[in-house]
Amino acid sequence: MKSKMKFKEQATCSLNMKASLNDGIKFNNYVDVICYGADGNVKWEELNRKNLVTNEGLDYILGVVFSDVAQDLTHYIGLTTASTIAGDSMASGLDEFTGYTGDRQAWTEGGVSSQSINNTGSEASFPITSAETVVGAFMTDDATGTAGTLICGVDFAASRTVANGDTLSVGYTLSAADS
């Protein structure tokens, strides 16, 4: 005699995951600015100042890495006379200090190492030609004008005065981490 048994199988599974507010890429960028007087002595320093990557800069980075935005291979450092905020761009919001010899200074990077890139040893040098107040520094992909991308900017702890004959040395360190 054969008996027929019927089994009813049922399985239930649930998975609850909570996303952390710290998930993703975190940019930790710092700027060192040293002001040398005409005599070559240090007048003031702004060291390890946290840098702001602008909205335009974030769009540029994402576009170059994940889309078809053309990468500019040369970047430039400039100086500001007002604070930089996330919504600033080269065309709107940036108040640039231009009281120095030449154009914005080319950023000469030393290559990527350990998720970081900097211009240590090749800091941008700004020979100051007029007395004024400087508030910060920025990085863009354009040597002159307002057509480029404002990638990032930094504000000093306090406004700083420069004089004719001073030289500002600007070092940028850009790094990224999985937060």
Image: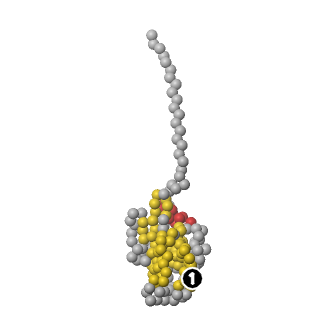
In the picture of the structure, the residue carrying the numbered disc 1 is: 133
Mark 1: secondary structure: strand
Q: Quadrant of residue 111?
A: bottom left
Q: Quadrant of the N terminus?
A: top left
Amino acid carrying label 1: it is: Thr
Q: Residue at x 53, y 72 (%)?
A: 153
The percent position of residue 43, horizontal first and vertical second, equals: 48, 83
Which color mode does the image show?
Answer: secondary structure
- Which percent across, then down, holds residue 21? 54, 54
| Residue situated furthest top in the rendering | 1
Could you tell me residue 159's position as x and y percent? 56, 79
Q: Residue at x 51, y 69 (%)?
A: 50
Q: Horizontal and vertical percent for residue 67?
A: 50, 61
Q: Is residue 175 left or right of residue 147?
A: left
Number of callouts: 1
Pick the front one: 120 or 72: 120
Task: Report crowding for label 1: few under 14, some 14 to 19, many 20 or more residues within 10 A (C-alpha).
Answer: some
**Residue 74 position by quadrant:** bottom left
User: Taking the image as drawn, is residue 138 in sight?
Assistant: yes
Work out whether residue 55 or residue 134 is closer to the camera in this orientation and state it.
Answer: 134
Q: Residue at x 56, y 85 (%)?
A: 132
Whether residue 64 is visible, yes or no, is no
Residue at 49% across / 18% down in the picture?
Answer: 5
Q: Is residue 128 or residue 39 the one in the foreground? A: 39
